[in-house]
Amino acid sequence: MRRGDIMSEKLIAKIGDTVAIASDHAGVKYKSILSKCLEELGFEVLDLGTCDEASVDYPDYGHAVANAVAGNRASAGVAICGTGIGISIAANRHKGVRAALVHDAFTAKMSRQHNNANILALGARSVSEDTARGILKAFFSTQFEGGRHERRIEKID
Ligand code: RB5
């Protein structure tokens, strides 16, 4: 990944911004991999746990990352569990949060262009490590298109 990919003002997070990241036990390895990628891109990483593979409950971590984004402690978030399903469901209970569960770089890109997603959710058991890195890069290097998509997003909350 290159820092030059994330220079635009219209992206969800700019160099130096804080990005919150959280996972349950199933996603802890991917959390470490993706935290490193975020640091390489120039973001400050706010790690909200979990910190090891002891079994925990994914809603606690989905709520933690959503609270950080909704409370403006982070510009964007990354949420990981086994499938990404449970943690994205929990995160999406928060007003102003648009957590997108994506499976490849294409859906990551679309979640930014059309949905202005502010939390990237993925499943450590459903995508490879390389795919996860590609997803992260696509998410943080893609701008929201605005226009007709703005009206649709306003109808969500
Ligand atoms: C944990 O075993 C698993 O249920 C969780 O990581 C996630 O996939 C839930 O949606």
Image (tube, rainbow, N blue to C red):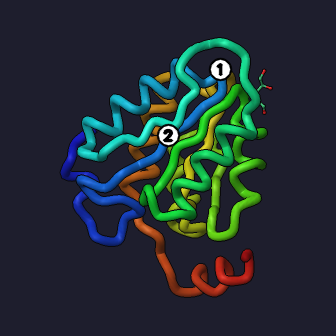
* Residue 25 badge: 1
* Picture residue at 64% right of the left edge, 53% below the top: 100
Dividing the picture into quadrants, the one containing residue 152 is bottom right
Placement of 104 over or under 131, stated as above or below: below
Queried on whether the Cβ of the residue with tag 2 lies below 8 angstroms from ligand 1, the answer reads: no
- Label 2 SS: strand
- Specify the amino acid type for callout 2: Ile
Q: Quadrant of the C terminus?
A: bottom right
The residue carrying mark 2 is 21
Q: Quadrant of the N terminus?
A: top left
Placement of 52 over or under 114, stated as above or below: above
Queried on whether the Cβ of the residue with tag 1 lies below 8 angstroms from ligand 1, the answer reads: yes
**Where does ligand 1 appear, by image quarter?**
top right
Residue 47 point in image, percent of width and height: 45, 36
* Picture residue at 50% right of the left edge, 55% below the top: 109
Q: Is residue 65 rendered to the left or right of residue 72?
A: right
* Picture residue at 41% right of the left edge, 66% below the top: 143
Mark 2 to mark 1: distance in Å? 13 Å
Q: Is residue 93 rendered to the left or right of residue 102?
A: right
Dot 1 crowding, Cα within 10 Å, few <14, some 14–19, many 20+: many
- Specify the amino acid type for callout 1: His
- Label 1 SS: helix
Residue 50 point in image, percent of width and height: 58, 26
Q: Is residue 105 rendered to the left or right of residue 85?
A: left
